[in-house]
Amino acid sequence: MSGSDHSYLDAITELSSEQIEVGTNTVITVSRQIQIVSPADTIWELLINFERWPDWNSKVTKIKTYGDCGPGTVIKWKVDHVKIKSVLQSVVPCQELSWSGTAIGIKAIHTYELQEANHTTLVKSTVRWSGILPKLLKKQMEKRLEESVSSGLEFLGKAAGGIRD
């Protein structure tokens, strides 16, 4: 087994042993959308090319994927100095990308939905958080999440070709 195979298996084992159940335990949900002047396939390529995210999203400082871009792919990343471990849940080309993940005190589900019409694409980003930090610091965490989702969409829009007013 090569070193990279070992890292992949460690990542899978680490994440599969953690039950990431946000759904009924959701404490905070933030959903924002933006109209981007680009076809869905251009936006999709930016989203699924995870290791290039730091090129267009300055909040992502480090990212490593383990596996192909499909359900079960593990992603380890650093966003705003916070280490996050994620697993892709849904990958529907040019329509939906979703992952579940954990960070210290937070369990999350993040979904991007894309709808193309008239040479533009509506991109909706929805994040649901549960865990001890969102419970204890709900207002502060909600504000931070709102800022994160909004800035992520703005970064994506600029990288993809522009935002439609």
Image (cartoon, rainbow, N blue to C red):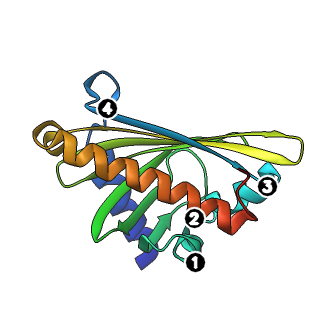
Q: Residue at x 25, y 26 (%)?
A: 25
Point out the tag, 1 or 2, that comes first from the N-terminus: 1
* Label pair 4/2, CB-CB below 8 angstroms: no
User: Type of residue at label 3?
Assistant: Val
CA distance for labels 4 and 3 = 33 Å
Task: Indicate the secondary structure of the residue bearing disc 2.
Answer: helix
Point out the tag, 4 or 3, that comes first from the N-terminus: 4
Q: Residue at x 14, y 44 (%)?
A: 137
Residue 157 found in image quarter = bottom right
In the displayed structure image, the side of residue 162 where residue 53 appears, left or right: left
Point out the tag, 4 or 2, that comes first from the N-terminus: 4
* Label pair 1/2, CB-CB below 8 angstroms: no
CA distance for labels 1 and 4 = 30 Å
Q: Nearer the viewer, residue 99 or 81?
A: 81
Q: Which mark is residue 37?
A: 3
Task: Indicate the secondary structure of the residue bearing disc 1.
Answer: helix
Percent across and percent down for residue 131 are 19, 39
Q: Which mark is residue 155?
A: 2
Percent across and percent down for residue 83 are 29, 65
Q: Which mark is residue 22?
A: 4
User: Type of residue at label 2?
Assistant: Phe
CA distance for labels 1 and 2 = 10 Å
User: Type of residue at label 4?
Assistant: Val
Task: Indicate the secondary structure of the residue bearing disc 3.
Answer: loop
Q: Badge 1 is on which residue?
A: 55
The local crowd at label 3, few if under 14, some if 14 to 19, many if 20 or more residues have their Cα within 10 Å, is many
Percent across and percent down for residue 125 are 53, 43
